[in-house]
Amino acid sequence: MKKAIVFAGGGSKGAYQVGAWKALNELGETFDIATGTSIGSINAGFYVQHDFDAAYAMWSELTAGAIMTNGINMDRSFEAVFSQRDQLVPFIKNYISSKGADVKPFHDRLQGYFNAGKFFGSEVDFALVATEFPSMNPVTVKKSDMARDPENAWQWLAASAACFPVFPVMEIDGKSYVDGGYYDNIPVAPAFALGADEVVVDLKTDNNHEGYLHHPRVRYIKPTRDLGTFMNFEREVLDRSMRLGYNDTMKAYGRYYGGLYTFIPQRGADYYQEIAAAFISLLTRMEAAYDFSGTVRFQRINKVPGCTTLLAEQCPMGKEDELHLFLAALEIYLKLIGKDDEREYDLDQLLFELKTDVYGLYPMLEFDAKEAFARVKAFAAEKTGKHNPELKRFEDARYAIIVTAVMRTLQQTRYGGGAVTETSDSERTEEPMPSEIFAALEREEDLPATGGRVKEEETV
């Protein structure tokens, strides 16, 4: 079975792809075919050459000046552009005289990285997409086509990445070409045309390939957050994109969990699925017991999306199982209490810290919804301040039910011995802390309860 990797277009977002490539290497994934458009064609070229280290080094040191003479970072805000005013005037002058940005630094760098011996000697097949100008007809260029002029084959990579009108058109053999993204920014079809049986798309941008969105043999690695503009080469932005690409790929392959947040599991999925099952049981009973008649007017309740429907909308496509529903709810709770969504979390340690935190909320939350909602809201406000915009979401009873169910799961579920069971309020004083996992994390015996709160004891 032949597997292909598709590198989509996206300018500076190509840093995300290299982060994803790093994760794929660690996962042991290899591909027989690489296709790309625009910046993706360049990353795909690196892949064909087996030059991950060179690709990673390039993206780790890339700047706007390495792409364009007097290059500037093109962010969405005027302030960001104006902050580069010393480079702005020279850039505009070069832009006018060159009928586009002066991309000689980019072409010199690309020519230096392209190794005809490695590229054409590689067993990995290749294709890119460019667009003929001014007809705007698409052109698919295969490795065999580029072999006719090996030493100048790098020019096809430059043509595919000629994001006109920012970049000037690329001339090859008397014809003009511009960015392949004008026709196909995600070249899945060329990958199948080269004989791929399975395709991994290394960047799912906003302009998804609708023709293959639900294809059973196409796997998408999806950015969980905005990557910024395609011409922003600020170091912080590129480093962040590389990190996100790595984490999102680990999530796509089930090594990490989470959507906006990144959870690193330390145990098998069965363990967390038991915790998720306890959460779903609590959530289901709370939702069934809640009286929605005061919030639903002139509408049948069966037409109102339920809690699990809201959570499913945040789950990865095709992963609306109990575990991912629980993780989606956990992310809502973390957002409420102000946890940083850019960092990675050890999932066991996180659950331990959260349980320790909510364990001090005494007495335990019960089914009296209004009282429970008020206590949960006050708990969150105490942690993040009364002006936390997430607190306004409590106006939706479904949101309040989800958050309260997470906290009740943390409070009332005992994790230990491979089993997950609910504990009652009366059991709390006898066995206040979960037995196995939390004891391991503490590296001590279970903490005792004193008046419903955890007491710190001196250790020798």
Image (tube, rainbow, N blue to C red):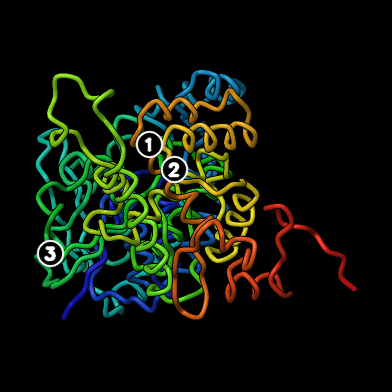
User: Whole-Å distance between the Cαs marked 3 and 1?
Assistant: 33 Å
Mark positioned earlier in the residue sequence (3 or 1): 3
User: Residue type at mark 3?
Assistant: Pro
Q: Which element is circle 1 on?
A: helix
Which of pointers 2 and 3 indicates the residue nearer the eye?
A: 2
Q: Tell me: residue 280, above or below residue 430.
A: above
Q: Quadrant of the C terminus?
A: bottom right
Q: Which element is circle 3 on?
A: loop
Q: Residue at x 46, y 62 (%)?
A: 55
Q: Which residue is mark 2?
A: 403
Q: Is residue 459 left or right of residue 94?
A: right
Q: Quadrant of residue 84?
A: top right
User: Residue type at mark 1?
Assistant: Tyr
The spot of residue 214 in percent (x, y) is 13, 55
The spot of residue 213 in percent (x, y) is 15, 52
Q: Which residue is mark 3?
A: 216
The spot of residue 197 in percent (x, y) is 13, 73
Which of pointers 3 and 1 indicates the residue nearer the eye?
A: 1
Q: Is residue 205 left or right of residue 143?
A: right
Q: Which element is circle 2 on?
A: helix
The spot of residue 346 in percent (x, y) is 56, 63
Q: Is residue 159 visible?
A: no
Q: Do the residues under discs 2 and 3 have CB atoms within 8 angstroms?
A: no
Q: Which residue is mark 1?
A: 399
User: Residue type at mark 2?
Assistant: Val
Q: Do the residues under discs 1 and 2 have CB atoms within 8 angstroms?
A: yes
